[in-house]
Amino acid sequence: MDKKIIGIDLGGTTAKFAILTPEGEIQQKWSIDTNILDDGKHIIPEIIESINHRLNLYNMKAEDFIGIGMGTPGSVDSEAGTVIGAYNLNWIELQFVKKLIEEGTGIKFAIDNDANVAALGERWKGAGENDPDVVFVTLGTGVGGGIVAGGNLLHGVNGAAGEIGHITVDPNGFECTCGKRGCLETVSSATGVVRVARALAEEYAGDSKLKAMLDNGEEVTSKDIFEMAEAGDVFGLRVVDRVCFYLGLACGNLGNTLNPSSIVLGGGVSAAGEFLRSRVEKYFREFTFPQVRESTKIKLAELGNEAGVIGAASLALKFAE
Ligand SMILES: [Zn+2]
């Protein structure tokens, strides 16, 4: 039997697991609830127990695996295999994840942060087509990202490479949770899109269902805004155009700096699909110089929420001879 790899996508509510072939085909998958009680001290023991239980169930042994890869929230030291400051896991103090999981399972272990791992997944088996130069931007509750350049995931000196959400797109813009102003995240995350709509509503006087809903204090989501815009709401189209301007500006500068074969848009906001992509591409073309404009493509993510386990598993391939 060929050796397999295991991918773990650890999140604040669930931990997703998958057993894959070294070619990235998922053979088994399962998930457990993440127990964040008691400073998150049950998380690693429960992950170990779940892996050992499943291996038993499938009649597999530690020797049948090349390794385990995991994506996690927080600041990751991928060399040391530690995590700190993962607040949605209650991991405030340093966690020795690699040491514990290797001891508990007898399988080699690699770790990186969740956005980087999702980037690896989309690059390997999704829209990135396994090209050596791919940028992934995830538009969800926040905006995250990962950069693969020359076949390598970029980490930077302090592990902060690929923090695409904090690219400044408006120096006088909204305050960000990071302490500065006008970050991409403040205008293109799910909450950011609504924030842009509220700000633009103040100066819009025309007839619009969306504008009326905002003025009436009704709850409006990013999804509502994209749907109303697609249905022809003139104010909705203005909001979407502004959001896509910011995304096109950020992607343009990523393109001008890195010239990847593709910049892949994923996360909940990207469910708007081609309606979003084509508009981001319009501004991307405006903000890139010819060599980049002609070679870097704006694409939609293809893997959905499996990008995490697939990308995490790919970390384990470094243990293959
Ligand atoms: Zn920021």
Image (cartoon, rainbow, N blue to C red):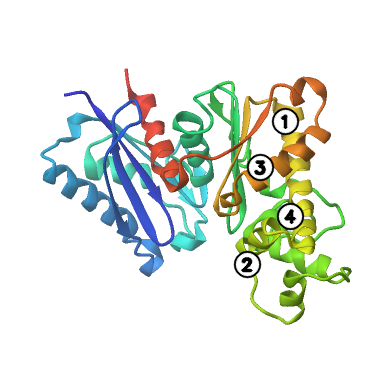
The residue type indicated by label 4 comes to Val
Of the pair 145 and 230, the residue shown nearer to us: 230
Q: Is residue 49 above or below residue 119?
A: below
Does label 2 or label 3 sit earlier along the sequence? 2
Return the residue at label 3. 277
Assess whether mark 3 and mark 1 are in contact (beta carbons under 8 angstroms).
no
Does label 2 or label 1 sit earlier along the sequence? 2
Mark 1 element type: helix
- The quadrant where residue 7 appears: top left
Q: Is mark 2 within 8 Å of ligand 1?
A: no
The residue type indicated by label 3 comes to Arg
Q: Residue at x 66, y 42 (%)?
A: 277
Badge 2 local density, few (<14 within 10 Å), some, or many (20+)? some
Does residue 306 appear left or right of residue 153 in this picture? Answer: left
Does label 4 or label 2 sit earlier along the sequence? 2
Assess whether mark 3 and mark 4 are in contact (beta carbons under 8 angstroms).
no
Return the residue at label 2. 221
Return the residue at label 1. 255
Report the disc number at residue 303: none
Badge 4 local density, few (<14 within 10 Å), some, or many (20+)? many
Image quarter (top left, top right, bottom left or bottom right) of the N terminus: top left
The residue type indicated by label 1 comes to Gly
Report the disc number at residue 240: 4
As drawn, the residue found furthest toward the front would be 232
Which is in the foreground here, disc 2 or disc 1?
A: 2
Image quarter (top left, top right, bottom left or bottom right) of the C terminus: top left
Does residue 39 appear left or right of residue 170 in this picture? Answer: left
